[in-house]
Amino acid sequence: MESLIFTALLMVQFTIMFSLGIGLEVADFKRVAERRFVFFVAVACQVILLPLVAFGSAHLFGLAPVLAAGVMLLSFCPGGVTSNIISKLSRADVALSVSLTAVVSILSFITIPPLTAISIEYFMGAEAPDFSFLRLAVITFLITTTPVMLGVFIRHHKPALVKKIETPLERTAIALWVIIVFLAIAKSWNILVENFVEMGTSMMLLPFVMLMIGLVIGVLLKLTRKESKTISIETGIQNSPMAITLAAAISGSELGITELALPAALYSITMYLVVIPFIFVYRKWQD
């Protein structure tokens, strides 16, 4: 049963990232090359500052080792479809948001495995699950890089097909994402109750701090308001379904969804509580 859940997680995450890929064009990647400075700032915020803040948060709230490792795993994940939707609702630079999400997602199979291995060893020590570094890299490649590139390929060669399936696929991806979150919370309900105050506060603080840091950096660097909002959102909103799936891969498919996935599952809920006020403010904050 648990191995079936793990297989389902892989399929769901593949679907979510494929839905992102079919919304991309080759021109989106060229756009990143044309706006190298903005891209560099966004990636630095997401790949360097976010894990540092997550590390501080895990220590500040004294999270249990497995939960601290789960927070770090979440911080290593790129933004996902959710960050693109929030960028659209916030009247940010959607094209930049999608391009950033795509590029960082494609490269994630290189960045996530080593950072995750270091974090799990640091926080969990002797309790760390015995997982294959190479297996994690391959799984990350299969559920992020592959579906995104496949989506881009299909959009380029079969635009008529994409037009038919894009909206239904996006809705399916969102529905599947909700199911993943509830499964993860239900599976780890007891540990959630025991650590609710620390976990809840930590998972509220992390997106708030990162949304603010991304915004402040954008303003200080005199980027446009659209660009600043986009960096804020891409820095503050992570791909929690991806973190849940990778947590299952690390723990072992025979265990299904474990406590390592709980921070990402809880974040999937608290993140909305934090980001909704930002959306209302950002909609009015225009260039």
Image (cartoon, rainbow, N blue to C red):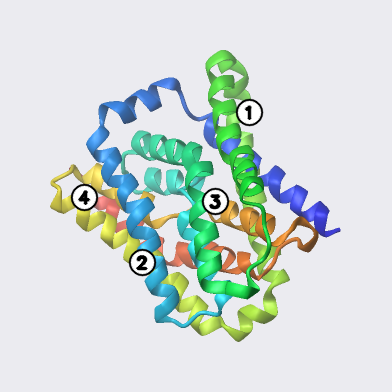
The x, y position of residue 89, in whole percent, is 39, 47
In this view, the residue in front, 151 or 67, is 67
Mark 3 neighbour class, 10 Å CA radius: few under 14, some 14 to 19, many 20 or more? many
- Dot 2 falls on a residue whose secondary structure is helix
**Residue type, mark 1 in image:** Ile
Q: What residue type is disc 4 on?
A: Gly
- Mark closer to the chain start, 4 or 1: 1
Residue 53 disc label: 2
**x 41%, y 69%: residue:** 55
- Taking the view exactly as shown, the residue that stands out farthest to the top is 157
In the image, residue 98 sits, relative to residue 204, either above or below, namely above
Name which of mark 1 and mark 3 comes first in the sequence: 3
Q: Could you tell which of marks 3 and 4 lies nearer the N-terminus?
A: 3
Q: Is residue 179 visible?
A: no
Say whether disc 2 or disc 3 marks the residue closer to the N-terminus. Answer: 2
Q: Mark 3 points at which residue?
A: 113
For the residues bearing labels 2 and 1, Cβ distance under 8 angstroms: no
Marks 2 and 4 in Cβ contact (< 8 Å): no
* Dot placed on the residue nearer the N-terminal end, 2 or 1: 2
Real-space Cα separation, disc 2 to disc 1, in angstroms: 38 Å
Pointer 1 residue: 165
Where residue 119 is drawn, which disc sits there?
none
Precedes in sequence: disc 2 or disc 4? 2
> Residue 62, how many percent across, how many down?
47, 83
Mark 3 vs mark 4: in front? 3
Quick check: can you spot residue 141? yes
Residue at mark 4 to residue at mark 1: CA–CA distance: 35 Å
Q: Residues within 10 Å of mark 1 (few under 14, many from 20)?
A: few
Q: Which-is-in-front pick, marks 2 and 3?
A: 3
Q: Which mark is residue 218?
A: 4
* Left or right relative to 272: residue 31: left
